[in-house]
């Protein structure tokens, strides 16, 4: 059989394959050069970029939990200007799709970062982080309210012609409401999900393990939750989806693709195996060959079930 | 350049009181490392999701009976990950990523005395350091403190591979009763600052106390830090410590895995 076609189209965004690396788990990409060929990735999503550098939260910031981990990094990042000046020129040499993850404390800050990225050579798309659980201002304030999410999405939509992805929070009553809010605001693509808010307790010292008490839960522990939310949104909103949440292997990625995601992001797995994303990609290709499927696009949202939600 | 390999446990020796010395087979390029660099160890298919960082304890040449291309790590069972590691026997498969981070530097002057200061399992990097220091360097002094006598792994090895081993225990069950900073303070009082270079690894309260002492006496003091980390190569940002830019009050968070694990005493903003 001929080599299967792994390329995907998500509205205006065309990728060579459906495997991206998730924001906050892949640095600015360059740190991974000793371990994998960046050019093989469908794309990478940068650490959240804010208008100015951010120090992040005090340590301890992470702890492993059953089949997952909690993190409370607090969006430590170099700032959008340093990203454009120092990181982007090197990334351009690797010829891969670079999705810039954007964070702001106010709507104006989101717009500021989007505008700067829009004018930079080498940014393929923008992902709005409106779902970070580890900062006081911004983030989830926008992501939890469909109307506020619609407004910030619209403001960013007007600030850039790049494909616009909105990353949804799972920490809501009904994710379909925020998904519709992002769609109404002009999002091209939805990515889901960000981390679940959680807490771990040090029982010997009778205090939270993390300095800021709560953190975002990621890893295989959240995968069934993420797959379910992906399937719900797939049936509620007519936008292409990027699924994520505890993907370690190609089998895990296929759960999201069958549930309606056109592409996936690999996150926590990058910490465990720095070449996790290309392992997932190899596994997807094997799956297509084994099932004699010509294109990964044929699988998207083809979950066989009589149930709708 | 770090490598990510699947390899075998050669030996996993129980040193008593939950202290273990694990030996694994490394590639030749992985053994080209400096002491206090570290490896991220993972157990495939186990309940331990993330890898755990371990300072290198032995490189080829450190332990006389070790096979070539073997690397040793010293660890104490404190949680789920180290508990699983302790259950591994010879032949068990592990994932090893490394070497990572910045290790110790040799003293800048041949006449400068290396002084090892270890707290309990914090003695881990010192066998590698002792065997790695240039031959012309002065033989090290070692100040080795612990809560009790059975928390002094490899004490016999240190006794025969250092100029002098000074042991302190909090309960007086071995060596001097008290903290390691007491005899160390006497050393710093009675020697010119430039004649000593401190290498320190141990629990955070000990690191802070030794750092204060060293700064007070103006002695060069390198600390090997420990932190929870998810990746080990600079992307999770989980392992940061507050640091101060030289000559300023500007505080920022540096990564133990990339900017460290060795940091100079004056840089840390504790």
Image (cartoon, coloured by chain):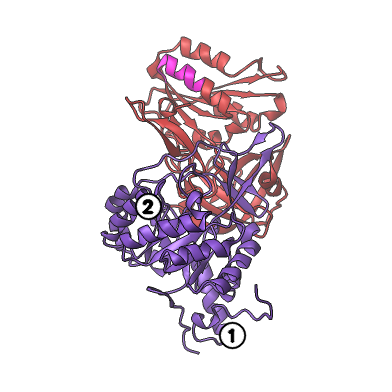
Chain colours: A purple, B red
Q: Chain of mark 2?
A: A
Between A154 and B199, the one nearer to me in the picture = A154
Dividing the image into 4 quarters, which one contains the C terminus of chain A? Answer: bottom right
Front tag of 1 and 2: 2
Between B59 and B223, the one nearer to me in the picture = B223
- Asked if one can make out residue A37 in the rendered structure from this viewpoint, the answer is no
Q: From which residue to which does the magenta span run?
A: B210-219
Q: Is residue B216 magenta?
A: yes
Which residue is labeled 1 in the image? A291
| Co-location on one chain, circles 1 and 2 | yes
Q: Which mark is residue A110?
A: 2
Quick check: B43 above or below A184?
above
Q: Chain of mark 1?
A: A
In the rendered view, does B91 fall on the left or right side of B207?
A: right
Instruction: Measure the alpha-carbon separation of dots 1 and 2.
Output: 43 Å
Quick check: B200 above or below B192?
below
To which quarter of the image does residue A154 belong? bottom left
Secondary structure category for the residue under label 2: helix
Residue found 45% across the figure and 82% down from its top: A5
Residue sitting farthest toward the front: A147
**Badge 2 density bin: few <14, some 14–19, many ≥20, Cα 10 Å:** many
Residue sitting farthest toward the top: B190
Q: Residue B112: image x %, image y %?
A: 40, 22
- Asked if one can make out residue B30 in the rendered structure from this viewpoint, the answer is yes
Assess whether mark 2 and mark 1 are in contact (beta carbons under 8 angstroms).
no
In the rendered view, does A101 fall on the left or right side of A270?
A: left
Name the N-terminal-most of marks 1 and 2. 2
Secondary structure category for the residue under label 1: loop
The secondary structure making up most of the magenta span is helix
Q: Is residue B96 magenta?
A: no
**Badge 1 density bin: few <14, some 14–19, many ≥20, Cα 10 Å:** few
Q: Residue A107: image x %, image y %?
A: 39, 51
């Amino acid at each position: 059989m001929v080599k299967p076609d792994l390329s995907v189209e998500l509205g205006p965004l065309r990728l060579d394959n459906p495997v991206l690396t998730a924001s906050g788990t892949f640095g600015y990409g360059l740190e991974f050069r000793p371990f994998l060929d960046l050019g093989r990735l469908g794309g990478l999503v940068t650490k959240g970029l804010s208008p100015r550098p951010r120090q992040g939260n005090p340590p301890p910031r992470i702890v492993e939990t059953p089949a997952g981990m909690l993190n409370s990094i607090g969006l430590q990042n170099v700032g959008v200007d340093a990203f454009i000046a120092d990181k982007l020129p090197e990334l351009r040499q690797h010829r891969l799709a670079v999705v810039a993850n954007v964070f702001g404390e106010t709507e104006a800050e989101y717009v500021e970062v989007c505008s700067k990225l829009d004018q930079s050579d080498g940014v393929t798309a923008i992902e709005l982080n409106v779902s970070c659980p580890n900062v006081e201002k911004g983030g989830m304030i926008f992501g939890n309210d469909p109307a506020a999410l619609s407004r910030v999405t619209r403001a960013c939509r007007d600030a850039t012609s790049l494909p616009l992805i909105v990353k949804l929070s799972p920490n809501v009553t009904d994710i379909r409401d925020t998904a519709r809010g992002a769609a109404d605001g002009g999002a091209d693509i939805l990515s889901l999900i960000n981390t679940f808010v959680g807490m771990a307790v040090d029982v010997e010292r009778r205090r939270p393990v993390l300095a800021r008490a709560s953190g975002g839960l990621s890893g295989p522990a959240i995968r069934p939750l993420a797959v379910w939310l992906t399937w719900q949104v797939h049936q509620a909103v007519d936008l292409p989806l990027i699924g994520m949440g505890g993907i370690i292997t190609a089998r895990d990625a296929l759960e999201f693709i069958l549930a309606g995601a056109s592409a996936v992001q690999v996150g926590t797995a990058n910490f465990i195996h720095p070449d996790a994303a290309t392992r997932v990609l190899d596994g997807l290709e094997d799956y297509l060959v084994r099932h004699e499927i010509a294109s990964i696009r044929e699988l998207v949202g083809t979950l066989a079930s009589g149930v709708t939600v | 350049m770090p490598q990510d390999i699947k390899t075998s446990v050669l030996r996993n020796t129980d040193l008593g009181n939950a202290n273990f010395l694990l030996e694994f087979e490394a590639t030749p390029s992985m053994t080209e490392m400096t002491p206090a660099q570290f490896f991220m160890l993972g157990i495939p298919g186990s309940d331990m999701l993330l890898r755990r960082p371990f300072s290198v304890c032995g490189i080829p040449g450190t332990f006389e009976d070790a096979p070539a291309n073997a690397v040793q790590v010293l660890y104490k069972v404190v949680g789920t990950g180290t508990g699983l590691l302790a259950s591994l026997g010879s032949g068990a498969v592990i994932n090893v990523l490394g070497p990572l981070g910045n290790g110790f530097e040799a003293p800048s002057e041949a006449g400068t005395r290396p002084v090892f200061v270890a707290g309990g399992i914090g003695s881990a990097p010192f066998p590698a350091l002792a065997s790695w220091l240039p031959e012309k360097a002065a033989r090290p002094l070692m100040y080795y403190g612990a809560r009790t006598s059975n928390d002094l792994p490899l004490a016999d090895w240190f006794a025969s591979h250092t100029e002098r081993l000074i042991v302190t225990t909090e309960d007086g069950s071995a060596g001097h009763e008290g903290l390691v900073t007491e005899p160390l303070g006497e050393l710093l009082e009675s020697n010119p600052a430039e004649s000593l270079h401190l290498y320190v690894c141990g629990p955070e309260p000990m690191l802070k106390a030794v750092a204060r002492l060293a700064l007070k006496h103006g002695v060069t003091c390198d600390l090997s830090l420990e932190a929870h980390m998810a990746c080990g190569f600079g992307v999770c940002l989980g392992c940061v410590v507050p640091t101060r830019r030289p000559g300023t009050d500007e505080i920022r968070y540096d990564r133990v895995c990339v900017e460290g694990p060795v940091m100079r005493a004056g840089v840390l903003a504790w």
